Amino acid sequence: MSNVVTRPTVKTAEKPRPPASLLVGDLSFIETQFPVSKMSVESYAERRANQSQTITGLGKWWGRKPLVLCRATILGLLLPATDNPPKDRDVFLRLMTMDDDGMLRRKSVNMTAKDLFSRLPPGDRARYFEPGSNDEKAKLKRGLSQDDKNELQRRVFQSLSHDERLEYCDRPEQIDGPSPASWVIINSHLGTRASSLPELVAELGERRFGHVLRVGDSFCGGGSIPFEAARIGCNAYGSDLNPVAALLTWASLNIIGGGEQVAAEVQQTLRKVFDAVDSQLTEWGIEHRQPDLKTGRRWRADAYLYCTETTCPECGCNC
């Protein structure tokens, strides 16, 4: 069983510009370096999101890969390694919105006055806080402009470690990518003209392979790799011997990837099927107990367990 999603090729410039730095043979970024620490905490943050994760609502799957890690791996394989490793790393982090500018774009929760006070240098506290403020009770000055409040949030946020910043940030997949200012830096280094991840993937794919990047996963499982590959503009292919895995991957690409309208239509259809089955089960009395003598309520099953039996080839018993 397999499923294929094809993304339209993004029109690229007729004459691609050369990258600002010299390429190191045919090596890709991931073959020379990889920000393991940042990727670890970002992956863990996605896992902690539980029900708000993008594709886990379709069904559980063991070994499901974090989407942020899939995106990083694909971009790491596509980006070229140059003779300027620090700049390579900066560009990669900008694409993943894990640099300072990207983290500010992802910041979606304001820090409390108490947190701002405790992290601001003592010499600067009088500028923003009322007299008498302390680590236990802090109050911003009255009359502070919105610009002053934004600058305070930005200043303290930038002083945090990457791990600490995640408490106040959306995940990379939840924003629309790098800022226009970052795209200027990215394009200058790579010799591209992109303004979005799909445009960059198309341009670098055409340059390196002569076509839009193709990503295939022959053991797609829950569909994380094909889903994220399709989302950033690759032609994505997925297959799996397990029909449940193939179904989950198809659903990720075609239901979640189909947009809000498709998801709403699917939910409406599922509700009709559920109501019809529930009505029939209730009419037949299947999975219903006799009414409770005290409350009169007729309890019914809402969860089911199943097991399979097999004959042991050594002892001959059913296990």
Image (cartoon, rainbow, N blue to C red):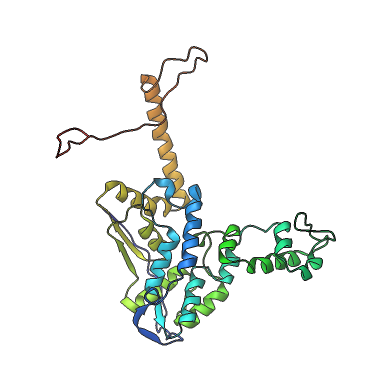
Give the image quarter of residue 2: bottom left
Q: How many marks?
A: 0
Looking at this view, name the residue that lies furthest to the top. Answer: 293
Residue 10 horizontal/vertical position (percent): 41, 71
The quadrant in which the C terminus is found is top left
The residue sitting at 53% across, 68% down in the picture is: 98
Against 220, residue 155 (above or below) is: below
Q: Is residue 315 left or right of residue 295?
A: left
On screen, residue 139 versus residue 101, left or right, reads right
Of 319 and 33, nearer the camera is 319
Q: Position of residue 214 (x, y in %)?
A: 32, 67
Q: Is residue 118 left or right of residue 262?
A: right
3 on left or right of 10? left
Can you name the residue that lies furthest to the right here?
A: 131
Place of residue 275 in the rendered image (x, y in percent of width and height, measured from the top left):
42, 30
Question: Foreground: 178 or 297?
Answer: 297
Which residue is depicted at the point 40% across and 71% down? 76
Location of residue 51 in the rendering, given as x and y in whole percent from the top left corner: 49, 47
Residue sitting at x 35%, y 32%: 305
